[in-house]
Image (cartoon, rainbow, N blue to C red):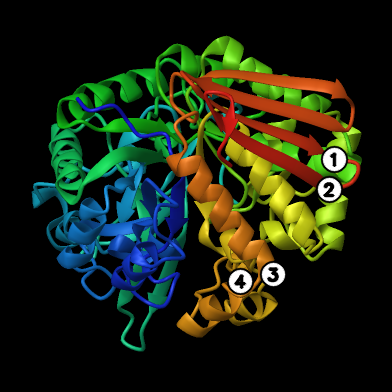
Amino acid sequence: MEALNWGPMLNAYPDSMSGTLDDIDDFLESPDGRDTFSAFYILPTIYHSDLDRGFSVIDYGINQELVSQNALTRLKKLGIDLKLDFILNHLSVNSPQFQDLLEKGDQSEYKDFFINWNRFWAGHGTMTEEGYIEPDPELIKSMFFRKPGLPILMVEFKDGTKAPYWNTFYQEVKTDADGHKSYLGQMDLNIRSEKVWDFYRQVLKTLASYGARIVRLDAFAYAPKEVGAKNFLNEPGTWDLLDKIHQEAQPLGLTLLPEIHASYQEGIYKKIGQKGYMVYDFFLPGLIIDAIENKDGSRLSVWAGEILERGLKTVNMLGCHDGIPMLDLAGLIDEDRIQKLIDLLVQRGGMIKNLHGKKNMYYQVNTTYYSALGEDDDKMLLARALQLFMPGKPQVWYLDLFAGKNDYEAVRGGGAGAHKEINRTNLTREDMRRALCRNVVLKQLQLLRFRNTFAAFAPDAAITVENPRQNLLIFTWKKGPYQACLEADLAVKRFFITGTENGQQVF
């Protein structure tokens, strides 16, 4: 199998940059975008979906309104690998499988495809008047839920009978004037069902056919469920599931990227790395802001050193389609320093996402990275330079690249739960044209082109990280006759980069 390219990776929705994936291809083929990226993480509106901007998948067919086969072919011709999402835990209520279940009930071939709550908890709780089992308290004491109440959706079948189904994430029930119910929601899959595994295998084959090299496993740690066990990161169930998916993905040339948010002190990232999987570096976004704002690179240096010492293969980022992680930093940065960081981002217009609806249990702050840095061009460029010299594969959120600001209008227009829209602005061609006249954008593209094309940035490069003074960080990559060096002075928001070949400066 061909080795994975570790150059920079663009991250966007198909309609994030002018409207369709073909428009993004136009940018990547243009003089401005050419040679800047070796991979592209396309978010799941590439599929047929109905909620959560793609993460409620109806089916994994291509959304022709946003993505053409020609657009995928163009990416392949550009030598750009794809990273695509596989949402293991759930499917949309509007999926063919759940619709068949609603139509036929127990006569459906998909009757075990989803998790009937009452069958799961039979003998382990008390039946309520509403028709669902309330589990014995000791069996759910270690669980936490993503919304108030039990994670169920009570559905009504065509014959009028009702049953509760496990529903970890979003749900919405509407009743028309005639009393007929319609549903929206993300219904949890039963990983003990062979039909679910047939479905998983087919999805992996489909993603490979689109040109995927990396498959991001979204929400997979919610999928393994056992009576009396945690409903998130159930061990060993989570790792058993991951290994089984790996066995299916490997022959297809797919590299798995498990998505798990957990605090540094829990050490989950170490387990993922020890098992040989790529690790999402959810620590870096907060660490870089902390380093720049406090003019202190010590914690960032320690984390970079640990990546190298443990041999972790990371995918890192600044911004992304979610917020800037805060929960993850616990144990890596002092609690009072994390809180000061949160307060600063909120002061700059960010919005707090608390853990599973619980107040004072921080999870992430929704903001663009540019706004999180006070919309300071020098800080944005310094942050990008630090990211590109960190060990790992850098992932670049399109809105950060174009120095996007917090979009409060999108939040106001999005209704309840629209806080994430603050960092998901769809750019027009004119927006991009204006941005490409700005130094903060052009310099980022220059840095990305250097990171993507200079031979020192190889997967097997020798990387050193030095922190000779609190405010000074020095990163060096060496591969054969090539060397790239970054000297970053956090006190004055300045950095100096050199690229040499056989000792002669070429950048």
The quarter of the image holding the N terminus is top left
Q: Residue at x 87, y 45 (%)?
A: 293
Q: Residue at x 20, y 39 (%)?
A: 204
Circle nearer the viewer, 3 or 1: 1
Residue 157 vertical position relative to residue 386 in the rendered view, above or below: below
Q: Secondary structure at mark 2?
A: loop
Q: Secondary structure at mark 3?
A: loop
| Amino acid type at image mark 3 | Asn
| Amino acid type at image mark 4 | Ala
In the rendered structure, are the residues bearing label 1 and label 2 in contact, judged by CB atoms less than 8 Å apart?
yes
Residue 326 position, x and y percent, is 71, 41
In the rendered structure, are the residues bearing label 4 and label 1 in contact, judged by CB atoms less than 8 Å apart?
no
- Left/right of residue 144 with respect to residue 486 in the rendered view: left
Q: Nearer the viewer, residue 330 or 448?
A: 448
Residue 123 position, x and y percent, is 38, 27
Label 4, label 1: how many angstroms apart (C-alpha)?
A: 39 Å
Label 1, label 2: how many angstroms apart (C-alpha)?
A: 5 Å
Reading the image, the residue beneath label 3 is: 406
Circle nearer the viewer, 4 or 1: 1
Label 3, label 1: how many angstroms apart (C-alpha)?
A: 24 Å
Q: Nearer the viewer, residue 182 or 233?
A: 233
- Left/right of residue 492 with respect to residue 283 in the rendered view: right
Query: First in sequence: mark 2 or mark 3?
Result: 3
Label 2, label 3: how many angstroms apart (C-alpha)?
A: 22 Å
Query: First in sequence: mark 4 or mark 1?
Result: 4
Reading the image, the residue beneath label 2 is: 493
Reading the image, the residue beneath label 4 is: 416
Label 4, label 3: how many angstroms apart (C-alpha)?
A: 17 Å
| Amino acid type at image mark 2 | Lys
For disc 4, the neighbor class at 10 Å (few under 14, some 14 to 19, many from 20) is few
Residue 9 vertical position relative to residue 276 in the rendered view, above or below: below
Reading the image, the residue beneath label 1 is: 490
